[in-house]
Amino acid sequence: MDVIAALAATLKKMFAGDAVLSLAAVACVVLVGLLLHAGVLPPSAAPWLLTFGVGCVLVVAVNIAVFKEIRKSK
Amino acid sequence: MLAAAAPIVLAAFLASFVEGVEAFTIVLAVSVVRGVRPALLGALAAFALLALAVALLGPLIARVPIHGLQLVIGVLLLLFGLGWLRKAILRAGGAVALNDESVAFDKQTAALAAAADWIAGMAAFKAVLLEGTEVVFIVLAVAARPGMLSPAALGAVAAWLVVLALGLAIRRPLARVPENGLKFVVGALLSGFGVFWISEGLGAPFPLGDWAIPVLIAAFLVLGIAKAAFVGVALGRKPAWT
């Protein structure tokens, strides 16, 4: 049982270690997919918009962690 | 073909190397405190289970429709890669302490001092199984196209053999391995693959084809390095890249 619990914890850490980062990244993918299939976004622009969106998600997630660290150290 | 295979082998090798170093620390601790037998039995049992997982899941994945598979695998790779990259940026910028394998080794040997042989063996089994699970996922995920499973698996196995050879040569935890630097690169590799597979899965592939993969990896690396430098400045701490 101990091994199964540890395995479950590892899987959670792998894909949802930071809930904000994971949810925002999935939301970004869903948004690009919806815009693409609605015909609003041209297929040639979708990969670049996705890359930009994911980059922004990463930057925001790091910023949140840094702000938390600054607040903790004050 | 080479443009597609090289980043896949590199991602499998580097990710496997980082996880191998962490697993080796615990297996070595078991070996030092309780002897080679429980360490070896635990590690081999975990390896057998992981090999079985690859043998079963590899062909099964090949039967799933390619676009759906690329989308699902791409999202999982992206989540995994961004997590590694975020942590590596925070460590490099000084916001989170660097991982120290010597400290992990000391903790493990202290915890195992009073343990029975089978408990020590289980510790080795768990370490290899848990770190190996991440490697298995990465191997299966980056190889999510026909003919790429073997090169990815070879890259992963080669990395664990290198870790084993280094570990047997120095008989100490591999504390001088630049773990955070490697995690930085692996995070960028997995994130790059994730975005690439998602785009293919959505039916909107990059115009550059397979050459988009190294471009994406480079973009995530540059973004990560710039962000880590920013974190260091914001916190007034010296960046620690390795």
Image (tube, coloured by chain):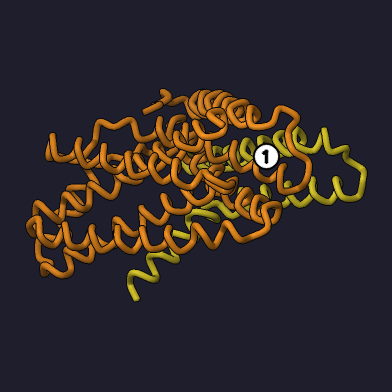
Chain colours: A yellow, B orange
Q: Return the residue at label 1.
A: A54
Which one is in front, A28 or B237? Answer: A28
Q: In x, y percent, where is residue A8?
A: 45, 66
Q: Quadrant of the C terminus of chain B?
A: top left
Quarter-of-image position of residue B118: bottom left
The answer to whether residue A70 shows anywhere in this view is no
The answer to whether residue B146 shows anywhere in this view is yes
Q: Quadrant of the N terminus of chain B?
A: top right
Q: Is residue B131 left or right of residue B77?
A: left
Q: Is residue A44 left or right of residue B85?
A: right
Residue plotted at (54% across, 62% down): B60
Residue plotted at (87% across, 50% down): A37
Residue plotted at (51% across, 59% down): B59
Please identify the residue farthest to the right as the structure is shown: A39
* Host chain of mark 1: A
Which one is in front, B30 or B89? Answer: B30
Give the secondary structure at mark 1.
helix
